[in-house]
Amino acid sequence: MHQSALVLFSGGQDSTTCLALALDQYERVETVGFDYGQRHRVELDARQHVLAALRQRFPRWATRLSADHMLDLAVLGQVSKSALTEETSIQMESSGLPNTFVPGRNLMFLTLAAALACRRDLQVLVTGVCETDFSGYPDCRDDTMKAMQLALNLGMAQRFRIETPLMWIDKAATWKLAHDLGGAVMLELVREHTHTCYLGDRSQRHDWGYGCGSCPACELRARGHAAYMAAQLPAALAAGAIPPASSV
Ligand code: ZN
């Protein structure tokens, strides 16, 4: 039985929800983040805010949440150019992939995470990759994850399991999962502290959190939040939490 996990944790909505799920399931959970010369440091700040908020708001998880690791991956900026590390606008490339794609990024993340997990004696690698409504990144696909699990286990003589709890769910379901795990407190933690916006905008607060509101990451997050909230309306009305429109 697996009892410990290493969560690839960026401070975004997806990896924060994965972290909450891991804290719900495993007795010891560590986190790893990567500094690859992101254009916006707010992502790295968000990680610390999320970890602090989880510890403060969820005492039952605080005892399980162990070390946080930060790995320097500046080399990624040397081998590839993308809209995540360069001052350039986000657009689709002729390859059919957005220019936010960094070839092999997730493969490197997983390889380094596995090496770290060896040293820290952690059994499960958790990552928030998703095929459902993401940008078509080939290194987020289920087949890629299965191949990585095999390659890492063969190459490191381990029995790691790579868990991808968000692989087949959409963003609305990711919001619901956060609520299922930690209720309204967890939902608000995700809204307030996680960061998704490609442009690093923390100046505009929307009902789904901070962001420019118009980059692909913001649009995906906002759309998922709207769908999630719309799905909650009938239940909230039935429970009397929201007065019917006719009585307002
Ligand atoms: Zn944005």
Image: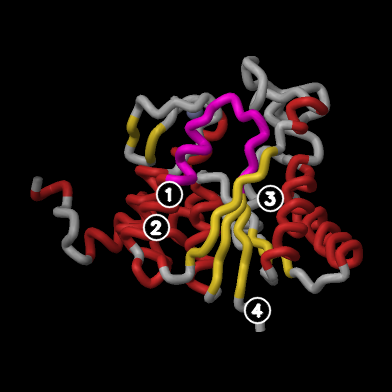
Q: Mark 4 vs ligand 1: CB under 8 Å?
A: no
Q: Mark 2 and mark 1: span between their CA atoms?
A: 6 Å
Q: Which residue is mark 1?
A: 50
Give amino acid for label 3: Glu
Q: Secondary structure at mark 2?
A: helix
Residue 131: give its label: 3
**Quick one: label 3, few (<14), some, or many (20+) residues within 10 Å?**
some
| Residue 80 percent coordinates (x, y) | 79, 27
Give amino acid for label 1: Val
Residue 147 colored in magenta in the image:
no
Give amino acid for label 2: Leu
- Which corner quadrant holds the C terminus? top left
Give amino acid for label 4: His
Q: Which residue is mark 4?
A: 2
Q: Secondary structure at mark 3?
A: loop
Is 86 positioned to the left or the right of 23 in the image? Answer: right
Task: Work out whether 72 lies above or below 213.
Answer: below
- Which corner quadrant holds the N terminus? bottom right
Q: Are marks 4 and 3 in contact (CB under 8 Å)?
A: no
Q: Mark 4 and mark 3: span between their CA atoms?
A: 25 Å
Q: Which residue is mark 2?
A: 54
